[in-house]
Each structure stands twice: as structure tokens, then as C-alpha cells.
Amino acid sequence: MSFFVNNNGELVSGDSYAIRAGNRAHLYGDGLFESIRVIDGHPINLQNHIFRLLEGMHVLSMQIPKEFGLPFFEREIHTLLVKNGLNAGARVRLSVDRKSGGTYLPKDNGVDYFIEVEALPDNMFVLNEVGLKVDLYEEIKKQINVLSRFKTKNCLIYIMGRLRAQEKGFDDYLILNEKLGIIESTSSNLFIVSNGVLYTSGLDLGCLGGTMRMQIINLALKHNIKVYECNISPQNLLAADEVFFTNAIKGVVWVQSYRSKTYVNRIAGILTDLLNQEWKTL
């Protein structure tokens, strides 16, 4: 936990009781969040994070305060980073919760916001030296619906998936949708590489609309690497040359093995370098 947090615009000690009794995110998961990477003390890709947050608030029928927007959250995050003395690599978690009151039917569709920051060991993105060992999480399937692409505070499928992976000796599990397509991992979007072409699950198939997913797609296309959105099956994994994950904090994370199949990390390494080039001039 950071030494200071931003509780609805007020900087308070991270050791204090910042979330009040009756908080709807605590009681019902009635909220959204964004995980934002910081490089050289600056939050990156913030515009896309805020766009997704506001879109999610609209879908959840939350009242969006008129000041909510890129300049507002840029100031709030910067102030908190400075207060905590963070001027290199860091992680920001920005939460928006519906105001307290009511049970399943809210009494107030207004919102509160909460910002936490913490230092990261690396200022830039670093590709993992040892690839991940993964398998399928088949106990619970993710539903395809209007909420699928947002980071809501209903994360139990990801928590249970990561716990089961740990129990079985895997680094991560792959999440299936209700149609048995492979859509993501417990914390990241999924890409596979076959013959130099990238494939990733489409948003219409239930995967998170990741900000890093979007950036990697744009980077690949910019550098003449073809990308296709499609359904991904276990057979596709077994035929792939590479498999890697993307998320806002870690960037690109390569997978070493899925069952009997092992992978290289050539494209993952290239994309990590391109990603760092995008942000090194901040």
C-alpha cells in the first residue's frame, strides 16, 4: 500500500480507514477500476484508460461527474505520485464506486473515486526471462455480455483460476468463454503467433478490452505485422509458434509451454522493444 492514497480528492495516509462502511464496491462489487503503468513518473496510455473507465460507468448507469476526464485524473494521479515520491516505474490503481446506499437497487447513482500508487522495480517494460507454464481453467466459464470488456470489481473467476493454477503447479490458467473459446488469462489478454501473424480473441467473444491489447495491436500493424481477431481453440495453441500475454502493468509476458507444446519468444521480444521505444521519450 502506498504511504498516501487519494480518497475522493483528499490525500490521506494509506494506513488509515479510507473506505467507509456501506461502500457498494465492498458489499456488491458495484464498481470499476483501472490499472495504469507509470514510466519516469508519468502515467502512460492514460487517455485509453480514462475512455474505458467512462464507457464502463455509462454502461453501469453511473452518473459521470462533469470534471471526470483526462486532465482531471492526470492532475490527481500526478499529485499522488509526487506526494509519494515516485518518479520512476510505478503502478496506479484508479477505482470508481457507486455511492453508498440501497441494496441491489442503489439509492444514488453518483460515484466516489479512490487512487492508490506503488513503486515497481523496473522503470521500463522488461520481458520475463523464464516463460510461463499454462493450462486451461475449465471449472468456470466467462460469460459473453456487455460487461465482459470492462474491469469490474467482480473478479472471482480470475481469482479462482489463479488459485487453481497454483494448486496444480502452473504459472497461470487460460480462461474460456461460454462457447469454449480461449479468450484471456487470469490477468491478461492473450495473443498467439503463427507464421509471423498475430491472433487474438475478439471483444465480441468476451475478453477484456485491454488497453495494452489495443496498443500491441496498433504497434504490430504500424510495423507491418498482421493481426487478426478470431476465436482461439486448444488446437490453435498446439499449432502456434509463440504465445504471449499483455497487460497494462507488465506489457508483454511470454508463455513457454502449454501441455506438450513449447514456444519461443521472438515476436514477444520485438514487441517489448517497440513498446519501450513508444514511451522512452516521455
Image (cartoon, grey):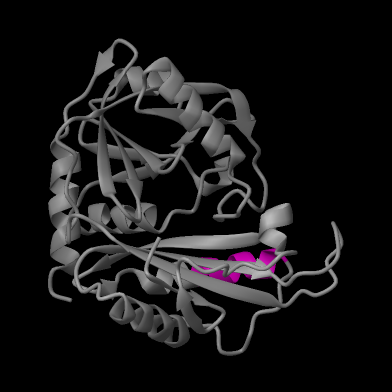
At 39% from the left and 82% from the top, the residue drawn is 74
How many numbered marks have been drawn onto this rendered protein structure? 0
* Residue 209 picture location, percent across and down: 49, 53
Residue reaching furthest to the top: 260
The answer, for residue 135, to whether it is visible in the render is yes
Position of 17 with respect to 276 (left or right) is right
The answer, for residue 175, to whether it is visible in the render is no
- Quarter of image, res 127: top left
Q: Quadrant of the N terminus?
A: bottom left
Magenta range is 51-60
Q: Is residue 42 magenta?
A: no
Q: Quadrant of the C terminus?
A: bottom left
Q: Is residue 192 above or below residue 27?
A: above
Q: Taken as a whole, is the magenta stretch helix, strand or loop? A: helix
Position of 134 with respect to 25 (left or right) is left
* Residue 182 picture location, percent across and down: 48, 30
Q: Is residue 55 magenta?
A: yes
At 47% from the left and 71% from the top, the residue drawn is 115
